Image (cartoon, rainbow, N blue to C red):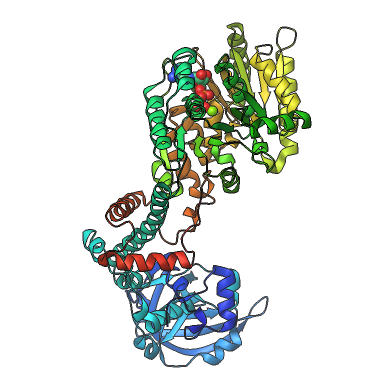
Amino acid sequence: MNLEYPITYINGVSVQRAALLYTELGIKTCNDLLNFFPFRYIDKTAFYAIKDLQPNSSEVQIVGRITRVKSVAQTRGSRLVATFQDATGTMELVWFKGQKWIKDALKINEPYVVYGKLNHYNGNFSIPHPELELVTEYKKKLQTKMQPVYHSTEKLINSGISNKLMRGYVQNVFQQFFETITESLSLEVIEDFKLMSKRDALINAHFPKSQENLAKAEYRLKFEELFFIQLQLLRKKLINKTKNKGYIFENVGAVFNKFYAEKLPFDLTNAQKRVLKEVRKDVASGAHMNRLLQGDVGSGKTIVAILSMLLAIDNGFQATIMAPTEILANQHFIAVSELVAGMNLKVDILTGSVKIKKRREIHKNLEDGTLHILVGTHALIEDKVQFKNLGIAIIDEQHRFGVKQRAKLWAKNELPPHILVMTATPIPRTLAMSVYGDLDISVIDELPPGRKEVKTVHRFDSNRLSVFKFIRDEIDKGRQIYLVYPLIEESEAMDYKDLMDGYESVSREFPSPKYQISILHGKMKPADKEFEMQRFVKGETQIMVATTVIEVGVNVPNASVMIIESSERFGLSQLHQLRGRVGRGADQSYCILLSSYKLSAEAKTRLKTMVETTDGFKIAEVDLKLRGPGNIMGTQQSGVLNLKIADVVKDTKILVHARNTAISILQEDGNLSNEGNLPIKNAYIKMTKSSKIWSNIS
Ligand code: ADP
Ligand code: MG
């Protein structure tokens, strides 16, 4: 007998009920049930006397006897009413459903323990649909002071699987399977952190003896859950480091040095230098690099990418950089081409709109090695694209790419190319530990010098005229303006109309020929988008009216004003990304958040946060608190959402303990072969077998 047995082995669980518990709650095995934790507890320590009941008492427990039962006709159907009394007074128990069955089951004049939500009407107390138990039965049960309440569903309740029944099932698991619950942490860890044993923790999580015991039980179980996740991520990283060989870029050669000495248009910031060092160390180590580069918008990730690619070229390899949109790919292509001009390097671009003939040429140049750097979109992971020797792949704005796509890049060589994924969506550190715990993480936490912080204000729609005046003044100073409209998928048609209406009113407000306006939205053909983009880049237009297609990565340093319409409809990370489009040049930049007066509490917090800070990590923290981890980019595939008891937002302290513990254990005993670590090893193996642990993410 073991905990992996299906729940039909639990006394009282029929095949039908087991099936329901599976479809409704995903509970299949006894272990699943043990790890299905209550979401609250009812304190049943107190018993009330009827005379002490108060109109505002909520849930009460009373001992007494039923003296009579009758059906009472009412407007629709009838209700069953039992008169219930103790030594101090009389009240009623009432049922609207299942009357026949209940009536037959009720025993007159026998002592019952009654529990339920108290109603007070016309000076009389009643409990509708109470929980009832004969005192003789009540005394037989394993009594605990606090009773668990489990999440349920309508289907379960309608099928008679009440909370009481669930409680019974869990009790039965403990009674039948107690001996098979084994410790999963080492004695050392348990002692170091003064943790409860596994058995005690499980019992106290379901049937706590006291609030203190509950807290200890929860701590232990959260620790354990986070510990095993970290253990897995860290082991994967370790294996990646020791087993997965990578190409070795030994030399910093002519190409890199020439670029650094002659082409680099500015001094690198210290943060950029540090990251570059981290990359160089990785690619020289003989192991495969799998690095995440986090850096706020405008922090200068691109130059780090370019320098990393030059390292590959110096060592006889090709390099590629993949972007999520054609606009971005084009921008990278232009930037890279300009920067390496005169260096005898061949750079090309491959996107969905590249014509067949050109495409063939690119394929050929890739295969014979004459092409050094390929910039592109998803198009470059098509099967037909074969590199001669791809040494490094840079993935920009990583959150737009799925796991499979990353894996596809790997498949192209004899060894996987080094991978550098770059993201401007800062992830709070503790979340990153869970989501990217198996990657190495670099952070650019410093903006290039001379950047002025973007001044951000929130204005209501009624201030529009003064906003327009502000735009005029800025344009007179030679600046350019973004005007962004929301794009929300469910109502694309409506958003499109908003955009067009907005475009019209802006055109009226800013008439040609004095003002030229670009427009950019998702429905346009790539070539048209690129055309409009280039007009703006060249300064031929002063205003860019757009949807969020410009959110990612667009770089026009002369654009210094970002106006966001209906800003209350944007998420925080989107707002932050949008604001990152300005503040790229030497001029003071501005971000104006326009909204209606009707704002939800959350929207208020979002706008306030934007006004108060430009720090992407702070913004990410707020975002995480507002929306939970489920909506943060990159978490979907990671499993942080399937946690049974821990919470990556609230339990960050435990997470840090768990991670550090996992690190020190793996440092000493990478294969968990020490005697003392046996419990950990066994639990770990069990979890990987039943795939309770997350699948790979990179
Ligand atoms: P992001 O990290 O958002 O991709 P970019 O790489 O596009 O940022 O850089 C933003 C702007 O900052 C670019 O115009 C780039 O040329 C400039 N830049 C990057 N690094 C520096 C630096 N060390 N000094 C001055 N300007 C820099
Ligand atoms: Mg970028």
Residue 384 shown left or right of residue 395 in the figure: right
Tell me what residue is drawn at x 25 percent, y 66 percent: 676
- Choose top left, top right, bottom left or bottom right for residue 154: bottom right
Tell me what residue is drawn at x 73 percent, y 23 percent: 503
Q: Nearer the viewer, residue 417 or 161?
A: 417
x and y percentages locating residue 226 in the rendered image:
38, 56
Q: Is residue 583 visible?
A: no
581 in relation to 191, above or below = above
616 in relation to 54, above or below = above
Count of numbered marks: 0
x and y percentages locating residue 383 in the rendered image:
68, 43
Residue 459 shown left or right of residue 202 in the figure: right
Residue 636 shown left or right of residue 354 in the figure: left
x and y percentages locating residue 510 in the rendered image:
70, 13
Q: Nearer the viewer, residue 480 or 369?
A: 369
x and y percentages locating residue 115 in the rendered image:
43, 77
Q: Is residue 589 visible?
A: yes
Tell me what residue is drawn at x 39 percent, y 69 percent: 42
Q: Looking at the figure, which quarter contains the N terminus?
A: bottom left
Q: Which residue ends up furthest to the front in the rendered image?
A: 368
Q: Nearer the viewer, residue 410 or 189?
A: 410
- Choose top left, top right, bottom left or bottom right for residue 447: top left
- Choose top left, top right, bottom left or bottom right for residue 473: top right
170 in relation to 483, above or below = below
14 in relation to 681, above or below = below
Q: Nearer the viewer, residue 73 or 454?
A: 454
